[in-house]
Image (cartoon, rainbow, N blue to C red):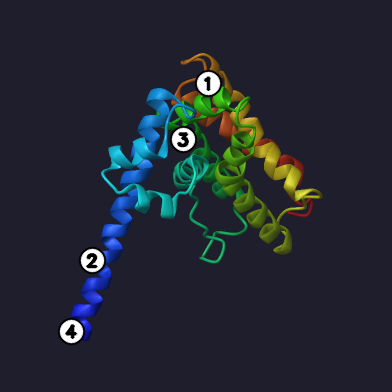
Amino acid sequence: MTMTTEMCDGTYHQRVKEEKRQAAVQAATDLFLEQGYERTSLQQVAKRAEVSTATLFKRYPTKAALLEAIVEEFWEVRDTREEEVPFGNPRVILKGLGTAYAQRLRAPEMIAIYRLIIAETPRFPGLGKMLFDKGEGHFVDWLKGYLNAEIKAGVLAVPDVPAASRNFFATIAGQVFWPELVLPGSGGTDADVEAVIDQTVTAMLALYTRADR
């Protein structure tokens, strides 16, 4: 076997592996939402995904691991802190981050996942913490990194970066997501969401922009 053939084989096997992973995650998502977390078994997920039970168990040994994969993939945030970022213009960055956060929160799939986890939390208490750690926690961590960079650059003065980061997203979610979760249609229009984000960014900058800027 030539080097090129080996490389092609490796690429093929990697692609097949990824396709099986995606099939398992999608099957689990569908089944969890159709019949609930407790009533779904790994065997059912494997059958729906058309993968062997052994293959599924090897990657996702528990239902919790599958649910983590669903949430983490949906909330994945590309980390641009090491790329070229327009420091000195935090309004642009904060508005973009707030918009991305609101859009993911308000996506029908995420609203359904939140409802599922809220319903199942009394029986599976760890699901709520997982939802934050694997989901919103990525956004909070990104914002903490960004704020620290702007502090170092002398643009912002934030005495408590973790609290400021959590409050930023909590303010947005409290107005555009939680009402929608309880009563569909009550979270406002896209224009309302944009206004909330603008107000949240303006309030944050008013608090933390250095007085000498």
Q: What type is the residue that disc 2 sits on?
A: Tyr
According to the picture, the residue beneath numbered tag 4 turns out to be 1
Q: Secondary structure at mark 1?
A: helix
Say which label, 1 or 3, has the lower sequence index. Answer: 3
Residue 208 placement, left or right of 87:
right
Q: What type is the residue that disc 3 sits on?
A: Gln
Q: Position of residue 202 (x, y in %)?
A: 65, 37
Q: Secondary structure at mark 4?
A: loop
Say which label, 4 or 2, has the lower sequence index. Answer: 4
User: Callout 3: few (<14), some (14-19), or many (20+) C-alpha neighbours within 10 Å?
Assistant: some
- In three-dimensional space, the C-alpha distance between marks 3 and 2, rounded to whole angstroms, equals 34 Å
CB atoms of marks 4 and 1 within 8 Å = no
Say which label, 4 or 1, has the lower sequence index. Answer: 4
* Frontmost residue, 56 versus 203: 56
* Frontmost residue, 118 versus 149: 118
Q: Position of residue 208 (x, y in %)?
A: 75, 46
**Is the C terminus in the top left, top right, bottom left or bottom right quadrant?**
bottom right
CB atoms of marks 4 and 3 within 8 Å = no
Residue at position x 29%, y 48% from top?
51
Viewer-nearest of discs 4 and 1: 4
The numbered dot on residue 181 is 1
Q: Secondary structure at mark 3?
A: helix
Viewer-nearest of discs 2 and 1: 2
Say which label, 3 or 2, has the lower sequence index. Answer: 2
**Is the N terminus in the top left, top right, bottom left or bottom right quadrant?**
bottom left
The numbered dot on residue 103 is 3
Residue at position x 69%, y 40% from top?
166
Say which label, 2 or 1, has the lower sequence index. Answer: 2
- In three-dimensional space, the C-alpha distance between marks 2 and 1, rounded to whole angstroms, equals 42 Å
Determine the image quadrant of residue 126.
top right
